[in-house]
Amino acid sequence: MRHRRSRIVNLPPEVLSDLAARVRAVDADLARDYSGDRPGQPIHTAYVCAADASKDLPDEWGAAATALADRHAGLLTDLSDAETLARVRETLARRPIQDLRLDFEDGYGTRGDEAEDRDATRAGQVLATLPPAVFSRGIRIKGLTGGEYGRAIRTLERVLDGAGGVPDGFVFTVPKLRAAEQVDVAVRLCEALEFAHGLPSGALLFELQIESPQAVIAADGTATVARAIHRSAGRCTGLHYGTYDYSAACGISPQFQSLEHPVADHAKAVMQAAAAQTGVWVCDGSTQVLPIGADDEVAAAVSRHFRLVTRALEHGYHQGWDMHPGHLVTRWLATFAFFRGALPVAAPRIDRYLRRQGGAVVDEPATAQALATVVLRGLDCGAFGPDDVTALAPAATVDVLTQLRERKSPTR
């Protein structure tokens, strides 16, 4: 059957103008809500009880982690290789902790106002004097809920007083999120504290801890966490998964509560989708299994944590909680091993992309962006150096990789 050829019709100018206006409006909304990924994410957050706050804490954790690495060097070498382990030991000596959160919530408990006031002031003093290697730092307050919000606000204010303002890289974690409206409270709190303390507008930033099913799916079926991000007025910098509170709220028996449980995977997948291209970082949760006890118990805990960190990286979660100095060993080891393993795959593909040569895999700009991002993450964390990259892809300098990540045409 023959089809009549369609006739080209020139749309009226007013229709074209209306369509253009609609397109521009949608583009503006998307640009506002999805500003793009934010580089510089730390590989971990070390959670420490605020009562134990000390300016020497990074060195103490680094020394304890190094001692564990020395005692179990054979196992750690088997998990990766001697060169990677040597790089880890050097990192533990120089910059063991990237991100520190002094905890005034579950890891602190209820100690009375006098004790918490004192610890909050000292925590602020410690945060203000930490070395630059701890480039992100802050506290976890108690929840902004009916029974705790007063104490949470009081603690946050005393931390700022103790610090003499907002320390570099400061962020506070808001736990127990169950409704997007709680983010409105956090934003209002930031505004009030900035005004009262004479701080610049936007100086205070926060993370949201996702540890209840209601933080993932609201009563109306919408994704609470997505709404929360876009109600934060640009102040939300991260989403932290709370492994055990979330699992318990979903009815998972304690012996099966884990970062690998399907309910954890679902929650983190929703968090990941909600945060994608917003500049908000997703942080994996913690494991309660600590590398302490007899040698076989430590070995089991070390192997478990290495596997969990590797799994998280494979799933695209580049940050996680560390609850014990020994976790730093396997955090750095698994992270370095992951990115060092990614480099021999990513760099040659970047090289072919830059040369516009063929091969078994033909990559598009979006794939080149992803390849450049994984290499830049490896460089940022210290898994390898720029010379290691250019040995495999001579044109792939840091500037070129950055241009690929930003979807710009590389200039060399």
Image (cartoon, rainbow, N blue to C red):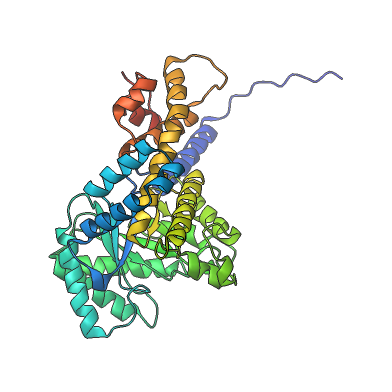
Q: Residue furthest left?
A: 164
Dividing the picture into quarters, in which one does residue 180 lie?
Answer: bottom left
Q: Nearer the viewer, residue 245 or 178?
A: 245
- Is residue 315 toward the left or the right of residue 75 in the image? right
Residue 347 against residue 358 in the figure, above or below = below
Q: Is residue 236 visible?
A: no
Q: Nearer the viewer, residue 192 or 301?
A: 301
Image x and y of residue 36, in percent: 40, 42
Q: Quadrant of the C terminus?
A: top left
Residue 330 against residue 253 in the figure, above or below = above
Image x and y of residue 329, in percent: 35, 51
Report the label total.
0
Q: Is residue 405 visible?
A: yes
Image x and y of residue 88, in percent: 32, 44
Residue 255 against residue 311 in the figure, above or below = below
Q: Nearer the viewer, residue 5 or 221?
A: 221
Q: Quadrant of the N terminus?
A: top right
Image x and y of residue 127, in percent: 19, 62
Q: Residue furthest right?
A: 1
Residue name at image x 18 percent, y 59 percent: 167
Residue name at image x 35 percent, y 18 percent: 394
Residue name at image x 54 percent, y 35 percent: 15
- Is residue 370 toward the left or the right of residue 64 in the image? right
